[in-house]
Amino acid sequence: MAEIFIAVDAMGGDNAPKEIVKGAVGALEDKRLSILLVGREDVVKRELSSYKYDAGRVKIIGAAEIIGNDEQPTAAIRKKKDSSVVKGLNLLKEGQAQAFVSAGATGALLTGATLIVGRIKGVERPALGTLLPNAKGFSFLIDSGANVDAKPGYLLQYAKMGAIYVEYVLNIKKPRVGLLNIGAEREKGNTLTKEVYGLLETSDINFIGNIEARDMPLGAADVVVCDAFTGNVVLKYTEGFAKAMLGMIKKELMSSMLSKIGAVLAKGAFENLKKSFDYSEVGGAPFLGLKALVVKAHGSSDAKAIQSAVRLCTEFTEKGITRRISESIQKDNIKEETE
């Protein structure tokens, strides 16, 4: 039996259950894994019948209910105890799985994760982190959607959690941490960013100061810190711009015979560009600061995206990110108490 157990919400997302189950089965290529598929048992069994897999490494966890995107998150979590989201999160709480992946309703997932799984002791607010492509690789944007209203202390913790994630998952030593702002100068920004700047510059992270949104695609920072309102706007704009840009490039390349010939010659380069903006390569956004890992996959996730999300969970678990974040937060708390 594999040592790492990943729970997957089989009913969450636009392409559930077909693509979710397909991606989960594909993830079994990693022999260290066992998958717990959470959802309507008859539906999941029917989807699994299309594949050949090691039945000893797949278990169905029955869940009769589904939480929709239009439901009030807190009410849905409390009312729908037999939903795939609630049951999946309880697997983490009970220690039956090391991570949970869902492409379902974001609000319900984040609310449920906080209420059921719980925060690491000392973490004020968990935060979503999203990898965004840049000219040098990726930037880790945190918070990208969890806490619209933030306090300075929250962003300090986001920065520390993000730095730990990037160091151990992306293997970037002493990652550069930038504060997203309307200008590079120290005095720029609103009350929140000015206070956060002071906290970050006196912390033990590799803080490089303010960065503007236009600097993110150039790879100005490895970790970009902001409140969730700002982060989600940046994230949604980036997704839309990437889609529009790739569409415009394709249109221009098909506009004449000469450009079509050029497109054939540059096909490999354009495929690589498209791949760098493909969310399915990343898999999902980790919700950092919880006692166990919850990954929010894109609502339109296909099998490839789910497989990538499970792979992310495996690496996160192997690198002990939750433990490292906990140790860092406890260290800060001890330091504050002795000062």
Image: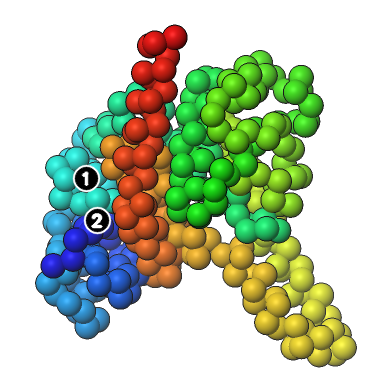
Which quadrant does the N terminus fall into?
A: bottom left
Residue 92: numbered disc: 1
* Residue 80 horizontal side relative to residue 127, left or right: left
Instruction: Count residues near mark 2 (Cα–Cα under 10 Å), then give few for <14, some for 14-19, many for 20+.
Output: many
Q: Quadrant of residue 176?
A: top right
The vertical placement of 310 against 47, above or below, is above
The vertical placement of 239 against 147, above or below, is below
Q: How many badges with numbers are in the image?
A: 2
> In this orientation, does residue 251 appear?
yes
- Secondary structure of the residue carrying tag 1 is helix
Residue under the point 76% across and 44% down: 214
Residue under the point 85% across and 90% down: 257
Q: Which residue is mark 2?
A: 7
> Foreground residue, 247 or 182?
182
Q: Position of residue 145 (x, y in %)?
A: 50, 38
> Foreground residue, 336 or 279?
336
Do callouts 1 and 2 mark residues in contact (Cβ within 8 Å)? yes
Residue under the point 37% across and 67% down: 307
Q: Quadrant of residue 111?
A: top left
> Foreground residue, 100 or 138?
138
Query: Callout 2, which amino acid?
Result: Ala
Please report whichever mark, 1 or 2, sits nearer to the chain's N-terminal start: 2
* Residue 213 horizontal side relative to residue 97, left or right: right
